Image (tube, rainbow, N blue to C red):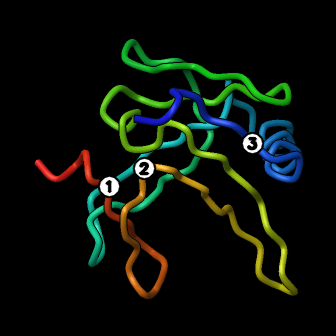
Amino acid sequence: MSESTITLTESAAHRVAEFLAAEGGVGLRLGVRRTGCSGWAYEVGLADEVGADDTVFEDRGIRILVDADALPLVSGTRVDFVEQGLNRHFEFDNPNVTDECGCGESFTVAAAAD
């Protein structure tokens, strides 16, 4: 398993800081949900509170919250925010991913093969 941490690029931290300033919240929530052809998709949003089963990371002044179920699937992930023309989105460099679907919307993690 990769190192248990979540990091942000400068671009991602800046974007999350903008959202937090506008919307409020205690930090960025990173999670996953079952979906797509490869099994998992990322969920990103603002967290209103720290849950009892959350692990809290801090990078570049931003708190990142991950619940216990998602942590093994996203541990070691670097989150980036990319702007390409009119398209703007978060991208994830997740060392746990063993396969991704062709459309890029979902991924497989070997540890989640239960």
Is residue 70 depicted above or below 41 in this figure? above
* Residue located farthest toward the left when viewing the structure as drawn: 114
Q: Is residue 95 above or below residue 39?
A: above
Query: Which residue matches tag 1?
Result: 109
Is the N terminus in the top left, top right, bottom left or bottom right quadrant? top left
Question: In the image, is 49 to the left or to the right of 83?
Answer: left
Q: Amino acid at mark 3?
A: Leu
* Residue at the spot of label 2: 96
Look at 61% across and 35% down and name the residue there. 6
The structure residue drawn at horizontal position 68% and vertical position 30%, both measured from the top left corner, is 27
Q: Residue placed at 49% from the left, 19% from the top? A: 55
Q: Are marks 1 and 2 in contact (CB under 8 Å)?
A: yes
Point out residue 19 in the picture as x, y percentages from the top left corner. Answer: 79, 46
Image vertical order of residue 80 relative to residue 30, above or below: below
> Image quarter for residue 101?
bottom left
Foreground label between 3 and 2: 2
- Side of 58 where 96 appears, left or right: left
Q: Pinpoint residue 70: horizontal percent, then vertical percent.
A: 37, 38
Where residue 83 sits, quadrant-wise, is: bottom right
Q: Secondary structure at mark 2?
A: loop
Q: Name the amino acid, label 1.
A: Val
Task: Tell me which numbered mark, 1 or 2, is placed earlier along the sequence.
Answer: 2
Q: Quadrant of residue 25?
A: top right
- Image disc number at residue 8: 3
Alpha carbon distance from label 3 to label 2: 17 Å
Q: Of 38 and 3, which appears nearest the observer?
A: 3
Nearest to N terminus: mark 1 or mark 3: 3
Residue type indicated by callout 2? Asn
The secondary structure type at the circle numbered 1 is strand
Disc 2 crowd rating (10 Å Cα; few below 14, some 14-19, many 20+) is many
